[in-house]
């Protein structure tokens, strides 16, 4: 049911010349104090989404600082993952409710996971998202513990929220991305507001020059000499890829040679993705300038990096969004970002300064045309965006936030 993710420690020294000096010094100071404490992180998947991406850097950095940090994930479990994807959607506002049978499967699986960990000790437990939040009900001593919610719970389905609430309340701390995500009946004194972050040295964000990026993009049938806009995110209804295609078609009336790339990853804990991709391919209506690509086509971290570097603008037209790491990724690569006016995207983007906030396909199209017709303004926005990310949304800041919270608990 559960397996450990192998990894090598990452030395904090790798980041010394990238991050603000005061952040680096504070990390070193706290790490000495916390050296040797055991921290266990648990989520569902080691790949395919933002949570896995964060943990792929955060846990090895903790290990590199001398903490005894480990990362566990779920083995493939299709029935359970179908139910937890429904829970994810319900917590983001979908109407309806779980059936009694779905609740039983969910609780039985959480009990099995808790049993797996009952003979393991940790000084701090960090459980990510709703999939395994209920292990707090069954574990003998899940303390001190943190529940980290990465999704937009500003308007949760109250039937499902109340089902999960007793399990959430058992945690010693809760982490949310925005204050407005704190759901009803939580103890606000236990809540901490911490934004996610990107790793500037990961394969997805390592420096890549434009000519190398263009060569990679060309391998997938795109023409680097023509304008390109990309949305890179999970194949998920809340990301509104259909709205992105609508915006592309409107913008194409003024920029006839425009290309669009919709890039995602198939994650083992996301059973909806296949149906969504099939529907999106129909929605292209045979337009050869729309590319729908994924890890199944060989688009992995380096290739995503290349598409972001090669793009004239990055789109993230979400209607609900816990945070949206791709916004910070695009800004780090000095690209203007057109983001949906939703959740954590609003936290990252300064409208009109580092990109644009939009709601409709028409607004998105208007901003695409503006950025392509005003390359100097686009470049200026990109440079501002990189500095915002450097000070607010790099993994070292997230690492420091975690160290402060561990220190508070132990």
Image (cartoon, rainbow, N blue to C red):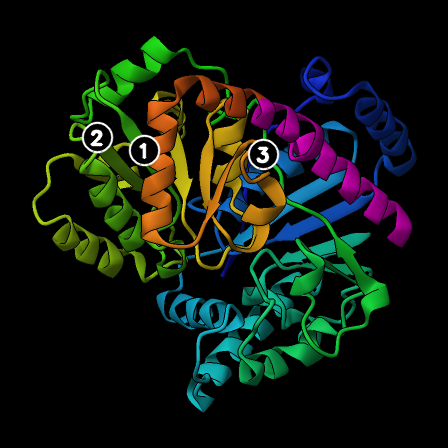
SS at mark 2?
Answer: loop
Can I make out residue 174 in this image? yes
Labels in figure, total: 3
SS at mark 1?
Answer: helix
The residue beneath circle 1 is: 369
Can I make out residue 9 in this image? no
User: What number is the disc on residue 337?
Assistant: none
Residue in view at x 41 percent, y 66 percent: 81
* In-image side of 226 versus 177 (left or right): left
Q: Give the dominant element type of the magenta stretch: helix, strand or loop.
A: helix
Q: Quadrant of residue 309?
A: top left
SS at mark 3?
Answer: loop
Give how far across and how far down residue 328 sits, in percent: 54, 35
User: What number is the disc on residue 198?
Assistant: 3
Residue in view at x 77 percent, y 60 percent: 145
Q: Which residues are magenta?
A: 384-410
Alpha carbon separation for disc pair 3 and 2? 32 Å
Give how far across and how far down residue 14 sits, in percent: 67, 16
Image vertical order of residue 355 relative to residue 113, above or below? above
Give how far across and how far down residue 338 sits, in percent: 44, 40
Label 1–label 2 contact, CB within 8 A: yes
Q: Quadrant of residue 290?
A: top left
Looking at marks 1 and 3 on the same chain, the residue that comes earlier in the sequence is marked by 3
The residue beneath circle 2 is: 255
Label 1–label 3 contact, CB within 8 A: no
Residue in view at x 86 percent, y 65 percent: 189
Looking at marks 1 and 2 on the same chain, the residue that comes earlier in the sequence is marked by 2
Alpha carbon separation for disc pair 1 and 3? 28 Å
């Amino acid at each position: 049911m559960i397996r450990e993710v192998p990894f090598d420690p990452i030395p904090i020294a790798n980041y010394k010349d990238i991050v603000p000096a005061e952040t680096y010094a504070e990390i070193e100071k706290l790490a000495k104090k916390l050296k040797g404490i055991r921290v266990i992180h648990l989520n569902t998947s080691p790949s395919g989404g933002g949570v896995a991406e964060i943990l792929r850097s955060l846990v090895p950095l903790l290990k590199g600082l001398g903490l005894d940090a480990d990362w566990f994930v779920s083995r493939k479990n299709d029935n359970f993952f179908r139910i937890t994807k429904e829970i994810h959607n319900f917590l983001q506002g979908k109407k309806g409710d779980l059936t009694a049978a779905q609740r039983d499967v969910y609780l039985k699986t959480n009990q099995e996971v808790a049993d797996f960990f009952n003979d393991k000790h940790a000084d701090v437990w960090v459980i990510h998202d709703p999939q395994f939040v209920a292990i707090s009900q069954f574990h003998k001593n899940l303390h001190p513990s943190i529940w980290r919610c990465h999704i937009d719970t500003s308007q949760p389905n109250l039937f499902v929220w109340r089902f999960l609430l007793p399990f959430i309340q058992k945690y010693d701390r809760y982490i949310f991305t925005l204050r407005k995500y704190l759901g009803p009946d939580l103890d606000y004194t236990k809540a901490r507001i911490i934004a996610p972050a990107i790793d500037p040295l990961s394969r997805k964000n390592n420096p890549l020059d434009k000519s190398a990026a263009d060569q990679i993009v060309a391998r997938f049938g795109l023409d680097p000499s023509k304008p390109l806009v990309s949305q890179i995110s999970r194949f998920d209804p809340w990301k509104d890829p259909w709205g992105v295609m609508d915006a592309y078609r409107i913008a194409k009336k003024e920029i006839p040679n425009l290309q669009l790339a919709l890039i995602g990853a198939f994650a083992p804990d996301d059973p909806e993705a296949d149906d969504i991709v099939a529907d999106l391919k129909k929605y292209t209506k045979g337009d050869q300038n729309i590319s729908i690509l994924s890890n199944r086509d060989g688009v992995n971290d380096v290739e995503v990096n290349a598409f972001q570097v090669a793009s004239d603008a990055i789109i993230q037209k979400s209607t609900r969004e816990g945070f949206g790491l791709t916004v910070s990724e695009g800004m780090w690569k000095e690209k203007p970002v057109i983001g949906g006016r939703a959740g954590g995207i609003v936290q990252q983007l300064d409208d009109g300064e580092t990109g644009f906030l939009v709601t409709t396909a028409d607004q998105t199209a208007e901003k695409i045309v503006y950025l392509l017709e005003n390359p100097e303004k686009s470049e200026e926005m990109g440079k501002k965006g990189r500095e915002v990310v450097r000070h607010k949304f790099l993994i070292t800041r997230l690492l420091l936030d975690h160290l402060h919270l561990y220190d508070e608990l132990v």
